[in-house]
Image (cartoon, rainbow, N blue to C red):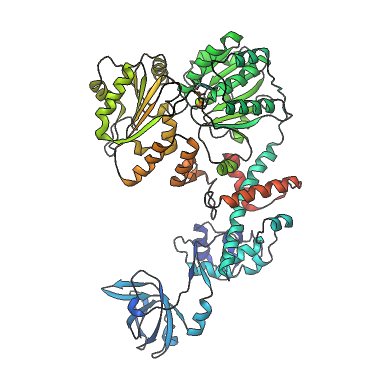
Amino acid sequence: MQGADAIRSLKGIGDKTEKTFHLAGIDTIDDLVTWYPRYYLTYEEPVYIADAQPGIRIAVLGKITNTPAYRQYRGLKIINVNIRDHSGSLALTWYNMPYLRNTLHMGESRIFVGTPVLKNGRMVMEQPEIYTIEAYEKQRENLQPVYPLTRGLTNKMIAKAMAQTVPYMETMEEYLPSFIVEKYGLMPYGQALKNVHFPVVKEQVGKARARLMFDEFFIFLAAMRMVKERTGVIENHYLIKETKESRHFEENLPFRLTNAQARALKEMKADLLRGEVMNRLVQGDVGSGKTILAMILLLMAATSGYQGALMAPTEVLAVQHYESFTKMLAPYGVRVALLTGSTTAKNKRDIYKQLKNHEIDIIIGTHALIQDKVEYDQLALVITDEQHRFGVRQREALSKKGYEPHVLVMSATPIPRTLALIMYGDLDISIIDELPADRLPIKNCVVNTGYRPNAYRFITKQVQMGRQAYVICPMVEESENVEAENVTEYTKVLQANLPPSIRVECLNGRMKAKDKNDIMDRFDKGEIDVLVSTTVIEVGINVPNATVMMVENAERFGLAQLHQLRGRIGRGAFQSYCIFIAGKDNEETKKRLEILNKSNDGFYIANEDLKLRGPGDFFGIRQSGMMDFVLADIYDNADLLKMASDAMKDLEEDGFSFSNLSNDRLKKQLELALQL
Ligand code: ADP
Ligand code: MG
């Protein structure tokens, strides 16, 4: 028997059963043996019949008090029997098992295991398992696996097919080198499979599952590693050094870099001079000052005679970066340009030409930057802002444009260490875990809608002191079933409630890019006092003079997203305030918002958010299947994840090549990793 064999080769699997299995995604022996039980039924001591309760699985020891009654009803062959112990009696029913007529006899005592239900006011146990007292004693030592079922698929069908694969599991080869198996005390793979499906002793189930979870992590990490192997070592053709200009720029910054910024910068400068191109993630909480690092590196690239690109997820952010870059880099004669979706066709053509002729040194924009049409003279450094990662495919797109550039990914979504380990196995990571010293911690409050008048007064006061405010609403237009505040309406309400001298404007995702940019620009310049907005301002925007953020329907947002939103304030030396208005106050909402109320630490919040929502939702990649481990859970099994990662390192030092690890699951994971 081989893993790739069709399950059709097993006894008892014909056309119909094969189809049923197929619907569950089980086609081969390997699919079958990795269809793990969800949990195990144990066999408890029998209870008295009088203690039976509907819906609770029990064993009862009873004497059969009648000759089994047999009848047919609507094509069902039904057998009824009554049993009794000294506490009471119970009716038992079996369907389509007519042969029981000959095995059950009046006067015999048997143990029956099943879940009683109420039928017409009477307690009935349907389809109970039947044991002699001796057989039950034996059974009590067993754990019975309970499998995930799909339409038509029964536990029995699975168990029957599984039983035939035992010889295959027993002779299965361990694919990990024995020193790893020993060092980490792993149960050998085949043995683990067998124990998961046919557990003999409870303790072994734990060890078996641990081994299989280790595998899930290990295979995942190996896939990430293979992505790296496949991409190969990318030779560094662009030695980007510090220049006269970049030193001057660094020495004349309006502030001192924080220690964390300085450390990250040093790591990146070292990357740029190595034999291999840089492939690094900078993770820094909102407001920790990532942009300035990007600026320094891009200035280094430009003044070293190369070109650099900065890619932002939204046009609004790209425009803002463009403006601060042109302003701050003006003294150094560096040519900066902006390329986005709303750049006019003529301008685009000009920019393409200038990029190709190296008349532009730094290009800032959205994804337009790496489209096929765009050609560079010498693109040496690509920085993406507010992205989780820069996929292999995107890299491939770039490599067509010349030698592969250095890549830096900047993300403000703080990811707990264990997760960063899996998500970014192929990247180096710098963490900026420190905010500039001049920052005052944001003051938060979580209130209900009754607090609005106070909030309006507070905003008025702040504006009169020269500050600005954001008000966030979740929806753009009124919709019938969602009672969310809508931006346009809300803007009118605010205008009516605030003194007429206060300039209130509105920004939403449906507006034309040009109009959005225009509004943002005026807010930046202080020509707008209160900006009512949807979450379009969520990422990246930097207006240090804004000190108030009021979030309507805060319960509708994820915690990480709220933290991102709140990150728009507290970016300067002024005390900032965040008002979360909960449109609904139930316990769960309160608990979630309380996490934000208590903490301004993005790493802590991300952790809590992850616990509440699970990793798939958190990353928005539930669909990708990437993190869908079957048994393992990155939270509960963080120790195994660590172990798998340590084992990978051991293997690497040992010169193990992951491309030799031929395994169907690995191949599947690899495909997913490549897509991400
Ligand atoms: P983020 O990490 O969220 O992208 P930014 O790079 O936009 O943050 O920086 C937020 C603000 O902090 C900007 O106004 C920036 O000029 C300022 N800033 C950056 N580094 C420092 C520092 N070391 N000291 C004081 N202010 C800083
Ligand atoms: Mg930023």
Relative to 139, 176 lies left or right: right
Pinpoint residue 582: horizontal percent, then vertical percent: 31, 37
Identity of the residue drawn at 59% across and 58% down: 210
Pinpoint residue 252: horizontal percent, then vertical percent: 59, 13
Q: Is residue 343 above or below residue 147?
A: above
| Front in this rendered view, residue 666 or 441 | 441
Pinpoint residue 561: horizontal percent, then vertical percent: 43, 35
Residue placed farthest to the left in the image?
496
Q: Is residue 57 above or below residue 611?
A: below
Q: Is residue 376 visible in this depiction of the protein?
A: no
Q: In this view, does 257 lie above or below 335?
A: below
| Front in this rendered view, residue 340 or 109 | 109
| Front in this rendered view, residue 620 or 436 | 436
Q: Is residue 239 visible in this depiction of the protein?
A: yes
Identity of the residue drawn at 44% across and 61% down: 151
Identity of the residue drawn at 51% across and 31% down: 285
Pinpoint residue 11: horizontal percent, then vertical percent: 58, 71
Q: In this view, does 332 lie above or below 94?
A: above
Relative to 361, 551 lies left or right: left
Q: Quadrant of residue 266?
A: top right
Q: Quadrant of residue 111?
A: bottom left
Pick the quarter of the image with the C terminus: top right
Counting every numbered tag in the picture gives 0
Residue placed farthest to the right in the image?
655
Pick the quarter of the image with the N terminus: bottom right
